[in-house]
Amino acid sequence: MHEDDVRRNAFAMPLENPSYPPGPYRFVNREFLIITYRTDRDALERVVPEPLEIVDPLVKYEFIRMPDSTGFGDYTESGQVIPVRFRDQTGGFVHSMFLDDDPPIAGGRELWGFPKKLASPTLQVERDTLVGTLDFGPVRVATGTMGYKHKVVPTERALHALQEPGFLLKIIPNVDGRPRVCELVRYYLRDLAVKGAWTGPAALELHPHALAPVADLPVLEVVSGVHLIADLTLDLGEVVHDYLA
Amino acid sequence: MKASEVRATAFAMPRHSPSYPAGPYRFVDREYMTITYQTDPSVLERVVPAPLRVLEPIVRLEFVRMPDSTGFGSYHGAAQVIPVRFGTETGSYTRLMFLDTHPPIAGGRELWGFPQKLASPKLEVDRDTLVGTLDFGPVRVASGTMGYKHHAIETDVARTSFEAPGFLLKIIPHVDGSPRICELVRYTRSDLVLKGAWSGPAALALYSHALAPIADLAVREVVSGAHLVADYTLELGEVVHDYLA
């Protein structure tokens, strides 16, 4: 293969058959269980990177079903998002994420900088309860529960939450082990169509694991539970701060 | 967290709990079944990136068991490897690689540029046969077999396969989707302890799959089968050609 062809085709590895396509990444019927909880402010201070600022000592614990996603297929995700401020903007810093599918892990890490690991999250309706779980290998690390569709949330309010930017700390090492990329990335969800949003009684349990330390941001009090279904496009991002500059 | 701390602790994502440790990466009792076969030379010319050059129309399919590996644990792999020349040096180019655990996929891709995907490779002894298989989801894509320890291979001959360098095409996109890293990487293995090497009758079958296209390098004739057991350290690499420069 000629060098010009390598350059022309270079999007992701493997060169001939990349782990993920170039997008745009459309998600149809994406279903969220988001449990917002109050945590220890000192624990948050240790993990939220400057220049992001903590607003309130809150964490959003999310379980997400993605049954129909460009290039990524049908998979489930779970993780923690911390509400933050960046200059005059509010948004969410994605602190940890666990998925059961390789293309969105590889693409998520390498394109945007989503801090993703392979694990076994689930989100399903069990009779009267919306149940989210996260297992890392054979070990349960998170269980979230919510009453099913108890109270409707106005569409505009649900839409507003999805319109806020997300922030990521993208880190990629050089082949010698030194940091090659260390950037704060901002991204948006576009072309949103909210198909339903509900609140209800919610509970969340986190357990310690060496490689999935979700319990390092302990649950002091559950603030709210939201169940949300939407179509959306995950847009590519932009670098808003370069830690190596 | 202060920006200076972010920079000082940045090795890999997630920053607070990286998907892989910083190495050195020691493999104990790493076991290979390597089946060398002849393929169509014109297809090889299309897939080997310049400035690497094809030596002869030969491909190796490797099934690997790694029971004891720094940070990566106990896992299996399968790889399609092509003998190549770079300048005056001979080595091998890894075209495709499949693993069943995540830390070596994330680390392999992001540090070195190993073209790894998540799948279900396996290498095991079944009575009289060493059996290697590769499944991608529910679909079988490779099946290799070899008679168990029929003839010992001389130590000097076996060592040469570990002493030759490996070459990789490391590609990482920017957050806007444009290529950020597109490099030819050279890596070596060190502190080799060869624990055994055998040859025997070998056979290989490859099957087509949209996302695991190993059968694109068709098996014309099996040349040899080798069964190897060794300890070694996988060294970090060096960039020997920058396609974006």
Image (cartoon, coloured by chain):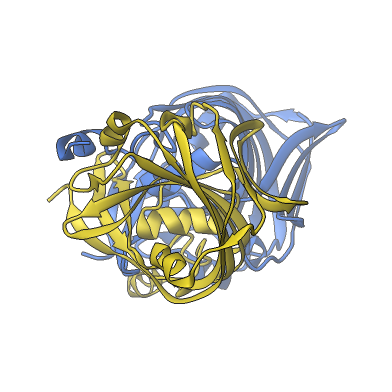
Return the residue found at the far right: A127
Q: Position of residue A82 (x, y in %)?
A: 53, 54
| Figure quadrant of residue B149 | bottom right
Q: Position of residue A15 (x, y in %)?
A: 33, 39
Please state which of residues B54 and B148 is positioned toward the viewer in this rendering. B148
> In the drawing, does residue B244 fall left or right of residue A177?
left
| Figure quadrant of residue A237 | top left
The answer to whether any part of residue A39 appears in the image is yes
Please state which of residues A182 and B219 is positioned toward the viewer in this rendering. B219
Q: Is residue A209 above or below residue A132?
A: below
Q: Position of residue B127 (x, y in %)?
A: 78, 51
Q: Which residue is pictured at 17% across the width and 60% down the height?
A: B88
Q: Which residue is pictured at 32% across the width and 48% down the height?
A: B172
Return the residue found at the far left: B245
Q: Colour of chain B?
A: yellow
Return the residue found at the far front: B151
Please state which of residues A190 and B29 is positioned toward the viewer in this rendering. B29
Q: Which chain does the blue colour mark?
A: A
Q: Is residue B96 above or below residue B148?
A: above
The answer to whether any part of residue B72 appears in the image is no
Q: How many marks?
A: 0
| Figure quadrant of residue A7 | top left
Please state which of residues A177 and A136 is positioned toward the viewer in this rendering. A177
Q: Which residue is pictured at 46% across the width and 35% down the height?
A: B221
Q: Is residue B210 above or below residue B177?
A: above
> In the drawing, does residue B160 fall left or right of residue B142?
left
Q: Position of residue B37 (x, y in %)?
A: 44, 41
Quadrant location of the N terminus of chain B?
A: bottom left
> In the drawing, does residue A231 fall left or right of residue B182?
right
